[in-house]
Image (spheres, grey):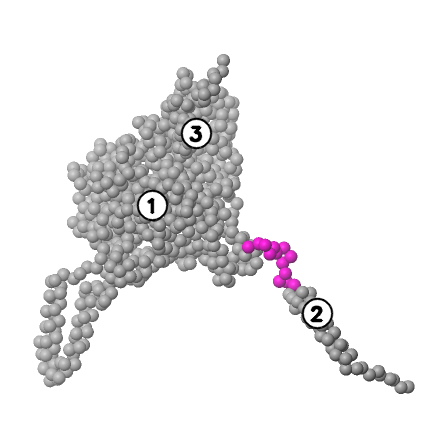
Amino acid sequence: MSIIIPRQSHGQCRLLTCSALRFWLLLLCFLPIVGCDGCRRTDDLDPQENPAEPEIAVGIMRTMPGHADSPLSYVKPAHWTAAYQDLKATRQDHRGVLDIEPLAADRRPLPVGNTDYSLVFSRPAALAKGQQKRFDLRLYMPPHSGEAQRGSVLQSSFVSRQGAMLEGMQSRVNTMPAYQYYFVVLTSRPAEFSYLGDDDWQRMRSDDLSDSEQNVHYRMVAPDTDGVIPVPDSVLQWTSIAYVLWDDLSPETLTADQQQALLDWVAWGGRVIVNGPASAASFRGTPLQTLLPIEASGSSELSGSELAPLLKTWQVPVDSERSTVADTTPAVIDQLTAVDSMPGAGGAKRDGAREVAGTNDLVVERNSGRGNVVITRFDLTSGWLRKWTAASGFYNGALLRRPPRDFRPLDFGVQTVFADDLEKQTRNPQLVSGLRILSRDLSLLSDTAAAIEGSRTTRPTKTTWISERFDPHVLGGIGAWNEKSGVSTVARDHLQQAAGISIPPARFVANSLIWYLAILVPLNYTIFRLLGRLEWAWIAVPVIAAGGAIWIARQAQLDIGFARSRSEIALLEIQGGHDRGHLTRYLALYNSLSTTYEANFDTREALLAPVSMSGGTRSDAGQQIRFRSGFSAGVQVQGINVPSNKTQLLHTEQMVALGGAISLDEDQATLRNDTIWQLEDVTVVRRSDQGDLESAPLGPLVAGESVELKFQSISGAVALGADVPEESQQLMRLVLSETQFPVGEVRLIGRIAGGMSGCEISPQASQVQAETVVVATLRYPSLPAARRDVRMRPEVQVLGEDFGEPAKP
């Protein structure tokens, strides 16, 4: 069989070639669209991945402490604050740095004081894809007046090593006035304490329509108790908290660092109210057990009749002419006497504990350092408390331990004021918070201080509730970071004189020249002549010259062609019986050529801010200082730029472990130093019950030593040690404040020779001068007796004509 194949013409072949080419081109175009499953890993696909989601999802920044259900964040200007922010990587893992920067209302960086520096707060952040993570931060909101403060924001930025960047996320913060502090309720049942938000003890209420602020003293917060409770883990961020009400939580719900922060906070003046039946037993065996005024022995039973004496004592008189409020005390007593048994907190009173006056031993208190802890043997969530019309006065006087209140008529209602001649002190922070830090709150009792303050017009009345030792006229109130305090003023004045390079005196130069010439000529000649090698004397000349130059440089503590100096004065404040101290340093850095310094602390509980050496104010900041936490074991502060031939003053604070406590026995006869430090020029001072000032000079006090105290009356100033340097004397006089020494207080004053470790400044200075003053308050006077309010707060009745309406018949 034959097969015949037809022949194609040249034109037909060309047409076929063009068609094939178009086919293959179309096929190549469709391949990228259709794709190939064989070239794709199915495990890389996320069916829930939303391409519209940002690479980094950011939550609202929240400050601590904060209410569990509130989206608002509050800060106190001039206080260091703890905060947290949630981040989530939506597409891949990220490792980077989270930065927070405080900004003014016009979104410019807020300068620190009257310096040209602003602060940026950084911490490392590692994000796993799809997992939300919380990052804790420390920050400082510099105080400023006017719109700059009211419109402040915290701006977040995240820079990832993988190249992703998030910047400009701003969280609005509300500022708290100087007289307002936090009242923290630690409870798993916040609804049971919702009635506290309506009680008038938390604000000095005024019904005058012109008073819009209402003098709110306490911002009530009940932090979320699921997971890590959002409260600060260092006392340095607890300064805006005045009270903690501890309900039904175990101390173990706080981390070890949070428990230590609470102990430190109480030692420096924090106040705790413990709902005994709900939590006292859970304190047993924990570090917080030492705070309780009673032994944590477990629960007990109370009868309603045991509460009757308490209600009768704290029953508030009713002003029958002005008040329409019926006193419910008799009805509540009748109701309670019918109750045979209710939960109570048992346990004997511990040493130093005492009954709060008029409570039938059902409310017990105990001082712990400067602070105070009150425990109730009855449940604070009991229904009878809500029905009792005098409960607000009981909270104010017996639990908060504040002055009694009175109620004054106004044109449009009633105003709440403090009694005991404190009517004009309703906004005095001393009556709101018991916290005191000497380096921040101690005032300079002189005309010079008043001139520096400028804004001070009147001083508080001298009473047992407030003291002129502490200055309330600060924008941030008590506990604020204060560069105008007495300690700051004394330190700044001293460092302004001491800072700089110490030029060697003429006598040093002359003696050095004489010794150099003596070695170079006669001694050099004599030695080599005796050796019979006189020609070697010429070889020794450059060696002697170089050695002499090195020796002179070391003796003068100068680097050839470049010089730095560091001057430091510090105050270590200790509370008797407490094994940690609060160390405040003031550092003056000087250099002959422009240098950028870095500060490295050996602890995470450290703060630093620049201080201006001159007066005036600034509205903008041209330089940034970066405050880094979490990158190492301690805090790092970078970007401290000091221009040529200039001095920069720094203010640092940190908590230091003492290795033990300084304690005084009950008879005030024996003092023991269980710290690791030897103290020099020690004197113990007290004010007797008769008002006499007495001192017991000791000289050096070795670590681990116990000494007997022999007090002697003194008529003038306390004698300081003969070897106390001049730069320490003024600071020691200030912290003693003999004229403001209250009856019942015992203080130790001394010093540590040189500076304390814990803060390394690099590059290091060739000249270093450092002095550390130590003050330990070994005993505090008891709080004034608890008292009920002067009268019941009347109901407010506003007539129609007050608003221009016709009177009703």
User: Tags 3 and 1 in contact by the CB under 8 Å rule?
Assistant: no
Any magenta on residue 43? yes
Q: Which residue is mark 1?
A: 481
Q: CA distance from mark 2 to mark 1?
A: 73 Å
Q: Which residues, given as a range, are shown in magenta?
A: 42-54
Any magenta on residue 532? no
Considering every residue shown, the one lying at the far top of the view is 809
Residue at 41% across / 18% down in the picture? 322
Q: In this rendered view, identify the residue nearer to me: 395 or 181.
A: 181
Residue at 50% across / 30% down in the picture? 382
N-term-proximal mark, 3 vs 2: 2
Q: CA distance from mark 3 to mark 2?
A: 81 Å
Which is in the foreground here, disc 2 or disc 1?
Answer: 2
Q: Label 2: how many residues lie within 10 Å, few (<14), some (14-19) or many (20+)?
A: few
User: Tags 2 and 1 in contact by the CB under 8 Å rule?
Assistant: no
N-term-proximal mark, 3 vs 1: 3
Q: In this rendered view, identify the residue nearer to me: 751 or 50.
A: 50
**Secondary element type, mark 1:** loop
In the rendered structure, find residue 200 and report the number of the disc placed on it: 3
Q: Label 1: how many residues lie within 10 Å, few (<14), some (14-19) or many (20+)?
A: many
**Secondary element type, mark 2:** helix
Q: Which residue is mark 2?
A: 26
Residue 753's image quarter? Answer: bottom left
Q: Position of residue 632 (x, y in %)?
A: 41, 59
Amino acid under disc 1:
Trp
